[in-house]
Amino acid sequence: MHFQKYGRNNFFHTLRRLQNERGEASEEKVSRACAALKQKGFIYDFSQSEKNSFNDRVRKRDFLIIVMPYRKIWFQVKSSNCGVQNHLGKNTDVPVIKIESQYSTEDVERILIEKFSLSIPE
């Protein structure tokens, strides 16, 4: 009985670790895409919430992008459909984007441009 419980706990611990790693990889892609969009002039600046900060854990905000004329857009990054659905069920005021593991940085740039109607100011 003890062995079965230990094995189950170990399984869920491993699963949680893998989910966290996938989420961190998605956020890294978004960070690189935001840096590229800033360099190209689509956004003025961006910031990422610190891990386990108030914005990250309570307000469910992973990133802030600033577009001209200084409009702020907060959004959440998820790496699964289940994560997106859970987020939308709790936080409908914070937009969410889903970033899958096979997406390139360019794919993420396109997603951000489309989701937030980004354009280069004239």
Image (tube, rainbow, N blue to C red):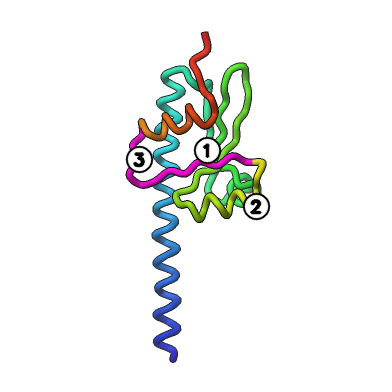
What residue is at 52 percent from the left and 38 percent from the top?
48
Mark 2 neighbour density, 10 Å: few (under 14) some (14–19) many (20 or more) = few
Q: Main secondary structure of the magenta part?
A: loop
Q: Secondary structure at mark 1?
A: strand
What residue is at 47 percent from the left and 44 percent from the top?
98
Looking at the rendered image, the disc whose residue lies closer to the viewer, 3 or 1, is 3
Q: Judge from the rendering whether residue 101 lies leftward or rightward of residue 5; answer left or right.
A: left
Q: Which residue is mark 1?
A: 48
Q: Quadrant of residue 7?
A: bottom left
The N terminus lies in which quarter of the figure? Answer: bottom left
Q: Which residue is mark 2?
A: 90
- Magenta stretch: residue 52 in it? no
Q: Which residue is mark 3?
A: 103
What residue is at 36 percent from the left and 47 percent from the top?
101
Counting from the top left corner in percent of width and height, residue 47 is at 53, 33
Q: CA distance from mark 2 to mark 3?
A: 26 Å
Looking at the rendered image, the disc whose residue lies closer to the viewer, 2 or 1, is 2
Q: Which residues are magenta?
A: 94-105
Q: Secondary structure at mark 3?
A: loop
Q: Nearer the viewer, residue 111 or 55?
A: 111
Q: How many marks?
A: 3
Mark 2 or mark 3: whose residue is earlier in sequence: 2
Whether residues under marks 2 and 1 lie with C-beta atoms below 8 angstroms apart, the answer is: no
Is 34 rendered above or below residue 1? Answer: above
What residue is at 48 percent from the left and 31 percent from the top?
112
Indicate the amino acid at tag 1.
Gln
Counting from the top left corner in percent of width and height, residue 34 is at 45, 30
The furthest residue to the top? 122
